Image (cartoon, coloured by chain):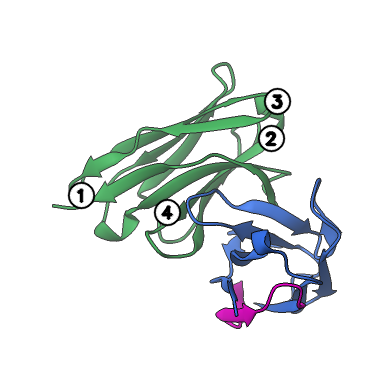
Chain colours: A green, B blue
């Protein structure tokens, strides 16, 4: 069974940093592009970032480019999102998702909540 | 790529047909997916390739369209279908989601 479990969320002040993790099981992690999608409270889905199976290619939404860094450890079957210079508007539930070549997303984690507030 | 959805809210009676629209600009061929999300749950993939149902999705869900205009049809709404529906393009990076259509009970 495919499982994705996010962790690392919490309360952080504006300008602060946080690292999210997504531990996966039930599939060959290195074969899949992985993605972060976020959802602000009461709002819609927002694509954030993706990384290829080897980690050689990364992609970012313009709104997080230069502030967020996506990475993965294929030995630990874990996806990461390093977030810095956090803004109030980054407050959201962050989901990791497995997609076919980073196209559409057939498996999702339940998310980890990031709250940016002073 | 800009992705829009209409209407924002759709009020439908159980057993009726629901038709949801998604527009992309510019053209995305058939690189479009649809998701269903219920409160407190992660999104669930319904349709990919504009018209291919994902594994385990009931036949009452169907997708159509190509280029810039797409439609998700739920042929006969069941109680478990009342939710928010999102479309998402994957023709180009960065991927983008539409703002969603809430399907509520009339």
CB contact under 8 Å: marks 3 and 2: yes
* In the rendered image, the vertical position of residue B31 relative to residue B102, given as above or below: above
- Out of B14 and A22, give the one closest to the viewer: B14
Task: Please name the residue shown 35% across and 33% down the image.
Answer: A8
B16, above or below A40, in the image: below
- Image coords of residue A42 (percent x, y): 40, 64
Q: Which residues are magenta?
A: B1-17
Which residue is farthest left?
A: A118
Pointer 1 or 4: first along the chain: 1
Looking at the image, which is closer to me, A9 or A67? A9
Q: Is residue A101 part of the magenta span, yes or no?
A: no
10 Å crowding of disc 3: few (<14), some (14-19), many (20+): few
Left or right: residue A111 compared with residue B66: left
Q: Is residue B5 magenta?
A: yes
Q: Disc 1 designates what residue?
A: A15
| SS at mark 3 in the image | loop
Circles 2 and 4 on the same subunit? yes
Judge from the rendering whether residue B14 lies leftward or rightward of residue B7; answer left or right: right
Dot 1: chain letter: A
| Residue labelled with disc 2 | A32
């Amino acid at each position: 069974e495919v499982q994705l479990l996010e962790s690392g969320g919490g309360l952080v002040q504006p300008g602060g940093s946080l690292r999210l993790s997504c531990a996966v099981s039930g599939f060959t992690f290195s074969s899949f592009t992985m993605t972060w999608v976020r959802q602000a409270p009461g709002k819609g889905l927002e694509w954030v970032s993706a990384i290829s199976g080897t980690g050689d290619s990364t992609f970012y939404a313009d709104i997080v480019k230069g502030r967020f860094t996506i990475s993965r450890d294929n030995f630990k079957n874990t996806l990461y999102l390093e977030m810095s210079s956090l803004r109030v508007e980054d407050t959201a539930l962050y989901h990791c998702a497995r997609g076919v070549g980073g196209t559409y997303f057939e498996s999702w984690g339940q998310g980890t909540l990031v709250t940016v507030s002073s | 790529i800009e992705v829009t959805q209409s209407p924002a809210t759709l009020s439908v009676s159980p057993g009726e047909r629901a038709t949801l629209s998604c527009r992309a600009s510019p053209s995305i061929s058939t690189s479009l997916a649809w998701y269903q999300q219920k409160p407190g749950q992660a999104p669930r993939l319904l349709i990919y390739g504009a018209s291919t149902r994902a594994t385990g999705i009931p036949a009452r869900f169907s997708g159509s369209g190509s280029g810039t205009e797409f439609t998700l049809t739920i042929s006969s709404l069941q109680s478990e279908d009342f939710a928010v529906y999102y479309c998402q393009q994957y023709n180009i990076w960065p991927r983008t989601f539409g703002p969603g259509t809430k399907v509520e009970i009339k």
